[in-house]
């Protein structure tokens, strides 16, 4: 493979080329919690097939499947032991082919999760790699001796001071060969060494195999971590003082663009028109995202950035602080502006790693329905490709966790143990977990009001949220005013009105503490989006530079009775009310 980081534009791909995913909406399925088909309490592929009509009714264009590959499930499938087979928990390759066929028959594309920053420690590549220092696959992972002059295995002898995402050192000592291997996540997720061209070849061959099978693209897990600073410097000491932050040495590292361009050449070339590629990139900046998503550079179609989901974090993820709307607008507005002329945004509130949007950014009590619809309206009217996380379209909420034993996710479990070891107060740690744990997103989808919410006939691997008697798909599909139908209408609007997909974005009143207001415009058409992020009535103030909006058409709103802007031209918004108006000319 030649190393060629060309950036020259080609006629087919200019920075402003219109792509099919500009008007598409993606739905994320976390298979373990979506639908069980065989009563073992764990969601599976046949369960997804059985629920495809729900997705078709919603109108989504793409399904992103979180990992279903063979896995010991240390991190719910993000630890892969065989990239080219399905874990028996989820089904078989034949089930997968049927899912693909049935989705395609409904006009829904299927995008696979691609987890290639690391494998499972049970992957045959790693089993070989750890077997001896001179094994041909030794260099497929990051093996290093103990720090000079220190006893291998002793505390502080790790090759660097980096902390792993799931607590503790990012290095694990291997007795067999007396060296350490790097794992930025759990010790069962050793990092692949992308410096080795054989690793890259093997990954590309595997990706081609899935594309040949008919999949429509990849969501690339922590893909901006694959290029590390090979000198592996220590990081600055973090909050606990025990470990260092290695991220400056592995986020968007020296060869990241080269690797992604090579992947594009080796895997996507010639078929990119029908595919969707999205790189998950913690810590990515707008400037870097412009490079990653400029179509002429041939890297990825869009990235998942993390700024807006970090605004309620203090020094670290478990240091929770209230979100300020002004900060949210500043962040999302900067991304809209930064990727306006080049590249493309992905848009999300929720995924399997984040608490539930309505509990975090809205009001999951009195105003749950209105605020869930408001959040949907605001997000789906931005420029970019919106992602819906399973259950978000129902307004599903965070989970009422009883105590420490209610948390199952490796990140939460490890953090609780570490925090207790550091002598933190259990009740405070639990509060942070209740707010921020990834487990909030992982309770089963609430299909109906029956005891297991229609998710399983057996014992669910994770308890269903007790509020499924009120919040469930059956009820919402039957109710034209539900959160579900609001999402459906927003998706339809994106499909039918080009201004939603491609219109320019202009933020209004950025300093207003509770009003999120912006316009989208394309040719003679302009949309005005107004959203009241509060439980109080809000008289919309004068919007600088705006024409008179009185009499404008109300395109969509989240309260049943539609109201035109009052005589003065601007309405009083009710608690958590959102409205979208249209003007032509
Ligand atoms: O997540 C990467 C990531 O940086 C975070 O969102 C992660 O959840 C973080 O630890 C939160 O504090 C991806 C996957 O989405 C996640 O589920 C995996 O656990 C992780 O990579 C490792 O594969
Ligand atoms: Ca099952």
Image (spheres, rainbow, N blue to C red):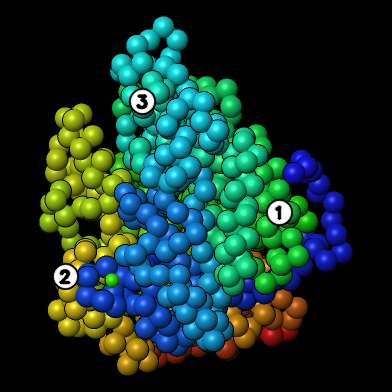
Callout 2–callout 3 Cβ contact below 8 Å? no
Percent x, y of residue 51: 38, 82
319 to 390, vertically: above or below: above
User: Of circles 2 and 3, which is in front?
Assistant: 3
Mark 2 lies on residue: 459
Residue at image coords 43%, 14%: 147
Rounded to the nearest angstrom, the CA distance separating label 2 from label 3 is: 40 Å
Mark positioned earlier in the residue sequence (2 or 1): 1
| Residue situated in front as seen by the camera: 441 or 199 | 199
Point out the image quarter for the C terminus.
bottom right
User: Which of pointers 3 and 1 indicates the residue nearer the eye?
Assistant: 3
At mark 2, the secondary structure is: loop
Q: Name the spot of residue 400 as percent of width and height, x first.
A: 18, 61
| Location of residue 468 by image quarter | bottom left
Ranked by sequence position, the earlier of labels 3 and 1 is 3
Foreground mark, 2 or 1? 1
Q: CB atoms at circles 3 and 1 under 8 Å apart?
A: no
Q: Which residue is mark 1?
A: 266
Q: Ligand 2 is located in which of the four quadrants?
A: bottom left
Q: Is mark 3 within 8 Å of ligand 1?
A: no
């Amino acid at each position: 493979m030649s190393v060629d980081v060309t950036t020259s534009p080609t006629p087919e791909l200019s920075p402003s080329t219109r792509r099919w995913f500009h008007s598409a909406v993606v739905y994320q399925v976390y298979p373990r919690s979506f639908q069980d088909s065989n009563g073992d309490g764990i969601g599976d592929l046949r369960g997804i097939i059985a629920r495809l009509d729900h997705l078709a009714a919603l109108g989504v264009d793409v399904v992103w499947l979180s990992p279903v590959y063979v896995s010991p499930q240390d991190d719910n499938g993000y630890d892969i032991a065989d990239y080219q087979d399905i874990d028996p928990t989820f089904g078989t390759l034949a089930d997968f082919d049927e899912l693909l066929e049935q989705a395609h028959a409904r006009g829904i594309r299927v995008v696979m999760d691609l987890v290639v920053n690391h494998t499972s420690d049970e992957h045959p590549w790693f089993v070989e790699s750890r077997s001896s220092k001179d094994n041909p696959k030794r260099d497929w992972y990051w093996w290093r001796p103990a720090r000079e002059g220190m006893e291998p295995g002793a505390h502080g002898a790790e090759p660097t001071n980096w902390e792993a995402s799931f607590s503790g050192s990012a290095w694990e000592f291997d007795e067999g060969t007396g060296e350490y291997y790097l794992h930025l996540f759990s010790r069962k997720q050793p990092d692949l060494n992308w410096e080795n061209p054989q690793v890259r070849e093997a990954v590309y061959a595997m990706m081609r195999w899935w594309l040949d099978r008919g999949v429509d693209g990849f969501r690339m897990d922590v893909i901006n971590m694959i290029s590390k600073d090979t000198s592996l410097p220590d990081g600055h000491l973090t909050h606990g003082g025990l470990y260092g932050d290695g991220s400056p040495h592995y986020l968007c590292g020296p060869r990241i663009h080269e690797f992604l361009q090579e992947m594009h050449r080796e895997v996507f070339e010639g078929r990119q028109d029908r595919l969707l590629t999205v790189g998950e990139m913690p810590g990515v900046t707008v400037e870097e995202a412009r490079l990653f998503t400029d179509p002429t550079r041939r890297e990825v179609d869009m990235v998942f950035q993390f700024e807006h989901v970090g605004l309620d974090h203090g020094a670290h993820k478990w240091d929770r602080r209230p979100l300020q709307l002004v900060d949210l607008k500043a962040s999302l507005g900067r991304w809209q502006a930064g990727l306006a002329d080049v590249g493309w945004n992905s848009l999300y509130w929720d995924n399997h790693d984040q608490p539930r949007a309505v509990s975090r950014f809205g009001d999951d009590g009195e105003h749950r329905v209105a605020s869930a619809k408001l959040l949907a309206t605001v997000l789906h009217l931005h420029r970019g490709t919106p992602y819906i996380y399973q259950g978000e379209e129902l307004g599903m909420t965070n989970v009422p966790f009883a105590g420490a034993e209610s948390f199952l996710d490796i990140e939460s479990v490890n953090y609780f143990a570490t925090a207790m070891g550091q002598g933190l107060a259990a009740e405070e740690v639990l509060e942070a977990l209740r707010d921020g744990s990834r487990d909030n997103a992982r309770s089963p989808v609430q299909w109906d009001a029956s005891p297991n919410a229609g998710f399983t006939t057996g014992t669910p691997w994770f308890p269903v949220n007790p509020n499924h008697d009120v919040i469930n798909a059956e009820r919402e599909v039957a109710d034209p005013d539900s959160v579900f139908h609001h999402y459906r209408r927003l998706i339809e609007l994106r499909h039918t009105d080009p201004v939603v997909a491609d219109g320019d974005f202009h933020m209004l009143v950025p300093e207003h503490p509770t009003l999120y207001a912006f316009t989208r415009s394309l040719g003679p058409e302009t949309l005005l989006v107004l959203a009241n992020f509060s439980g109080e009535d809000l008289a919309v103030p004068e919007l600088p530079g705006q024409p008179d909006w009185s009499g404008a058409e109300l395109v969509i709103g989240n309260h049943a009775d539609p109201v035109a802007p009052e005589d003065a031209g601007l309405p009083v918004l009710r608690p958590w009310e959102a409205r979208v108006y249209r003007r032509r000319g």
